[in-house]
Image (cartoon, helix red, strand yellow):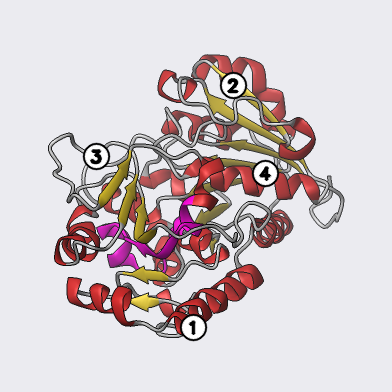
Amino acid sequence: MSAASTEPLKIVVLGLSITSSWGNGHATTYRGLVRELARRGHDVLFLERDVPWYASHRDLPEPPDSSHGRTVLYADLPALQRAHARDVGEADLVMVGSFVPDGIAVGDWVQSQASGCTAFYDIDTPVTLAALGRDGTSYIEARQIAGYDLYLSFTGGPTLERLQREFGSPAARQLYCSVDPALYFPEPVAQDCDLGYMGTYSDDRQPTLEALLLEPARQWPEGRFEVAGAQYPDGIVWPANVRYTAHLPPAQHRAFYNRQRFTLNVTRADMIRAGWSPSVRLFEAAACGTPIVSDRWDGIESLLVPGREIFLADSPREVTRLLRELPEEERRAVGERARQRILAEHTAAHRAAELEAHARMALLRMPVREAA
């Protein structure tokens, strides 16, 4: 296909998972993105490594081809190479995601095999860059960054310039996570939770969760709190007024947010340092009209206006004051303003259009390459 063509693109995505959201935030991102790319008329093939921990927790085991492109599971790297060399070689865009098993070898193969545009989609950019500065990662090496025509990053701001300056990326572009407004919206349900939080356990998030949810729960015994997420250690002692759920599949996320008067957004340490790294949970909660209480990081004000569309908190006292003293009319207004902002800028349809534009621009810059 001509680089300047406006015809549909042939796209191959090698991602961590689209069939299982267990313990990862990648699946919901890929589901929305792939579906919207397919709606735009593109031919999308999603290739996922068949691994036991996702096989036993699949909440979308067979994504419908009509709305989610095509999904194919492969057993290992040799099986991938045998079955899909032609798909990769003929695609207009081949995108490899962060945390893909054997991602370094997969990336080398894609860069040698593809005749179209190659991209690395980093859903974990600050984690990736921090790891490259230490012991490295299992899914990308620093030398490979310059070999990808596009570096698509969940993190914006100064990180994009750093990827180009320090690592030689030809084009580092922001591609934030997103929300599906058909799945996340306000519902008139009973609100039985004053403050909730959804997120997989991590050592670096736990102190903030302790300060901004567990301590307020202790200080306000009459309050109702909830935490949902996998991999929390058995030794955690939850206050009596905190309800804990080990895993909520995406089909239950909307109800989770709608039950809450407020929801908590907690950011990983590497992402706080990088800034401009919104969580998909932030977008999901906002789309439900649930007011958000968040920790602070550079760039958050470019997404939602503090005090008007989101609340920022540094201490248990600030959280408790919001929960107990904010007038109900203002609480609802903040949630609705955030909802309108997110729906105007951060849906999966917005991301699909952005990805298509980035890919077409990269194709225009590329010399003609022959398939391997």
Look at 62% across and 15% down and name the residue there: 82
Look at 15% across and 42% down and name the residue there: 236
Look at 25% across and 59% down and name the residue there: 269
Amino acid on which disc 1 is placed? Glu
Q: Secondary structure at mark 4?
A: helix
Look at 16% across and 62% down and name the residue there: 215
Q: Secondary structure at mark 3?
A: loop
| Quadrant holding the N terminus | top right
Q: Against 223, is 370 above or below?
A: above
**Foreground residue among 266 and 4:** 266
Please give the label number shown on residue 34: 4
Question: Cβ–Cβ below 8 Å for labels 3 and 4?
Answer: no
Q: Tell me if mark 2 has few (under 14), some (14-19) or many (20+) residues whose alpha carbon lies within 10 angstroms of its own.
A: some
Q: Earlier in the sequence, mark 3 or mark 1?
A: 3
In the drawing, does residue 98 fall left or right of residue 269? right
Amino acid on which disc 2 is placed? Leu
Look at the image and give the residue range highlighted in magenta. 256-281
Query: Label 2 belongs to which residue?
Result: 73
Amino acid on which disc 3 is placed? Tyr
Query: Label 1 belongs to which residue?
Result: 329
**For the residues marked 4 and 2, what is the alpha-carbon distance in whole angstroms?**
16 Å
Residue 170 in which image quadrant? bottom right
Q: Secondary structure at mark 1?
A: helix
In the drawing, does residue 248 fall left or right of residue 216? right
Query: Label 3 belongs to which residue?
Result: 232
Q: Earlier in the sequence, mark 4 or mark 1?
A: 4
**For the residues marked 3 and 4, what is the alpha-carbon distance in whole angstroms?**
30 Å
| Quadrant holding the C terminus | top right
Image coordinates of residue 246 in percent, x first then y, are 33, 37
Question: Cβ–Cβ below 8 Å for labels 2 and 3?
Answer: no
**Res. 42 in view:** yes
